[in-house]
Amino acid sequence: MGRGRHALPLARAGYRTFGVDSTFDAVRDAVDAARDAGTPIHAWCADLMQHPLPAARFELVVVTRYLQRDLFAAIRQSLTPGGIVLYETFTVRQRALGVGPTSPDHLLEEGELRTYFEDLEVLFYEEVLSPDAVARLVARKRS
């Protein structure tokens, strides 16, 4: 959920919004921000390896600045036909910037993100070096 960074704008735009984070404080902060804005969101605190995403449930999945490789299959399966995934996270080139994650568990290799969504229609893909070294992908599940 990233402190509700994405849930609240989507909810304000009229989308039925769900957020999940394994950190209770992040869930609480997102729910509080949504309540204060008068915009409802659905949120739960969970480890997605213990409590997986429901299959074919979401029209849009947004993941930013987070990498857990064993969740890619669940993300793909959670999309409805025609559903979109927006994904952005750090690459190994982030190390050269001296800030952010440094563990290979939290950094993508060059071109790696795209491989996890090969069975989807990739609408956009890029890897940038500034201001952060990130890979960005927008892909649609085929109908």
Image (cartoon, rainbow, N blue to C red):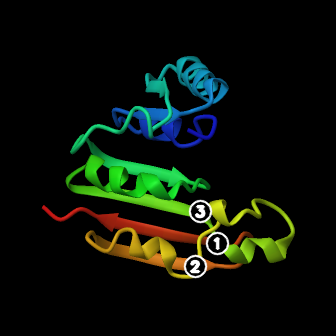
Q: Are marks 1 and 2 in contact (CB under 8 Å)?
A: yes
- The spot of residue 86 in percent (x, y) is 43, 59
Q: Residues within 10 Å of mark 2 (few under 14, many from 20)?
A: some
Position of residue 65 relative to residue 127, above or below, is above
Question: Which picture quadrant has residue 58?
Answer: top left
* Residue at the extreme left: 143
* Residue at the extreme bottom: 110
Three-letter amino acid code at the position of disc 1 = Thr
Q: Label 3 belongs to which residue? A: 89
**Residue 65 in the figure: left or right of residue 10:** right
Residue drawn at x 64%, y 66% as measured from the top left: 107
Q: Label 2 belongs to which residue? A: 127
- The spot of residue 7 in percent (x, y) is 49, 37
Q: Label 1 belongs to which residue? A: 91
Position of residue 41 relative to residue 58, above or below, is above
Residue drawn at x 63%, y 78% as measured from the top left: 128
Residue drawn at x 34%, y 39% as measured from the top left: 53
- The spot of residue 65 in percent (x, y) is 62, 55
Q: Residues within 10 Å of mark 3 (few under 14, many from 20)?
A: many
